[in-house]
Amino acid sequence: MTERRHTGPLQVQKPLYPEGRSVCHTVILHPPGGMAEGDTTKIDVTQGPDSKTVLTSPAAAKWYKSRDKFSSQEVRIRLGERAQLDWLPPENILFEHARADFRFQLELGQDASAIGWEAFVFGRRAMGESWDAGVLRINSQFIDINGLLWGERANFNAVSRIRNAAQGLGAFPIAGMVWATGPSCDQLLAENLSPSLPFGDTLRAGVTCLNHRLIVVRGVAQKMEPLRELMVRCWSFLRPAIHGRQSQPLRLWSV
């Protein structure tokens, strides 16, 4: 790491190197622990050529009740030539009446590769909430040297039909996605991953290969722990092929 700057509550911890000096593990801290109405966080990351980084946070992000204004998180990551990224944040918990706006943009240089995930818990399950009111907006863009590789937008509220539709969330209260992109992403890699994915009453997942350069695994679950374990297994499977390095569980996961 050559430079780190922050304004407001977001902070970057001292970098760690559990995989050796070639891979920088960095933890992004948000001491308030949650997003109140109108809060905005922006994360801007630039990786130089041949750099290798693992980015994560120590705890789930909580999105509190909003009467009118959206709370928002904007992430922009630029990868230089042959750079490698693991983007592994904890889940997002949407409280009743939360209004959350997520924006994620990944820009890939020549032969760069990245693996990441995102998960959403609709309502505080331990408190008996089912997220009966609220809005979630998502805007993701993946851009490589040839232009837009993949873009996706979601804009639905708590009573949207997509929450119960079979082609949507299927009435599951938790949803997550693992994605991977790089020169080694192809249909064969997705087909090799597919047989290990579950399809049951409490946990379901499927994998797709897009544009011969991007793999997307989508999952839904009744509880966060099994979905988190599934996401880690997918990352562990994909990392050797995408980055050429074996997976190493993060220390935070055992805390």
Image: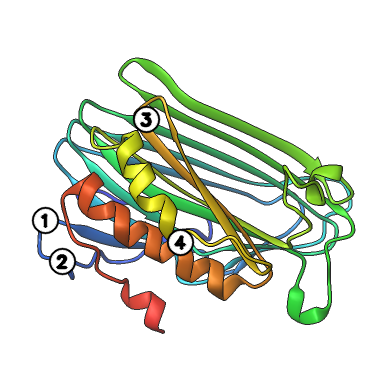
Note whether residue 145 is visible.
yes
In contact (CB < 8 Å): disc 2 and disc 1 = yes
Q: Earlier in the sequence, mark 4 or mark 2?
A: 2
Q: Residue furthest front?
A: 195
Question: Which amino acid type is marked by label 4?
Answer: Met
Check disc 4 and report the residue beneath it.
231
Q: Which residue is mark 1?
A: 22
Residue kind at label 2, given as amino acid type: Glu
Mark 3 vs mark 4, CA separation in Å: 23 Å
Rendered view: 143 above or below 218: above
Is 127 placed left or right of 245 in the picture? right
In the rendered view, tell whether residue 193 sits above or below residue 190: below
Residue at coordinates 31% horizontally, 39% vertically from top-left? Answer: 188
Q: Earlier in the sequence, mark 3 or mark 2?
A: 2
For label 4, the crowd category at 10 Å Cα-Cα, with few meaning under 14, some 14 to 19 and many 20 or more, is many
Q: Which residue is mark 3?
A: 107
**Amino acid type, callout 3:** Glu
Q: Quadrant of residue 69?
A: top right
